[in-house]
Image (cartoon, rainbow, N blue to C red):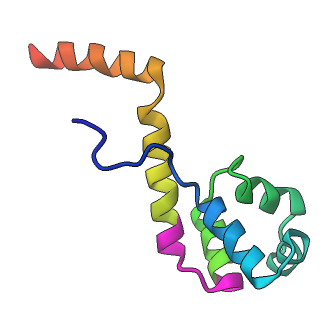
Amino acid sequence: MGNLGYGAYPTHPGEVLKDEIEYRGITQRKLAESMGLAYSVVNEILNARRSLTAKTALMFEAALDVPADSLMYLQSKYNMQTARSDKSLNDMLKSIRKIAAVL
């Protein structure tokens, strides 16, 4: 199937959000306070160490006016591209395809 147009490195939505708050001059701590989240949660999302959920995407949308749907699309692409680069998963998928081919 090839790489289906995915780039070499997946973009975590936190990278986009981090650029946005830096552009606006908002600190992570201030953003976390305004969203009612722990600083560590916001920091982990912005540094791509935690996945964005629908709930947190909506919270970022409310705080920054960045569309939650777009953020969730980025998260989904990030998850798929990360999974596609997992060697043990790829080995398992090859095995499943071999079995499925004879069904």
Examine the rendered structure and indicate whether residue 64 appears above or below residue 32.
below
Comparing 94 with 85, the one in front is: 85
5 left or right of 54 in image: left
Examine the rendered structure and indicate whether residue 101 appears above or below residue 6.
above
Comparing 103 with 39, the one in front is: 39
Give the magenta range. 62-71
Examine the rendered structure and indicate whether residue 82 appears above or below residue 67.
above
Q: Residue at coordinates 21% horizontally, 35% vertically from top-left?
A: 1
Q: Residue at coordinates 46% horizontally, 17% vertically from top-left?
A: 88
Q: Residue at coordinates 49% horizontally, 60% vertically from top-left?
A: 74
18 left or right of 75 in image: right
Please count the marks in the image. 0
Is 65 a magenta residue?
yes
Q: Quadrant of the C terminus?
A: top left
Q: Measured from the top left, where is residue 29 in percent x and y? A: 90, 70
Q: What's the magenta bit mostly, secondary-structure-wise? A: helix
Q: Measured from the top left, where is residue 56 in percent x and y? A: 66, 67
Seen as rendered, the residue at the extreme left is: 102
Q: Measured from the top left, where is residue 31 in percent x and y? A: 83, 76
Q: Measured from the top left, where is residue 61 in percent x and y? A: 62, 80
Q: Quadrant of residue 60?
A: bottom right
Is 101 a magenta residue?
no
Q: Residue at coordinates 25% horizontally, 36% vertically from top-left?
A: 2
Q: Quadrant of residue 93?
A: top left
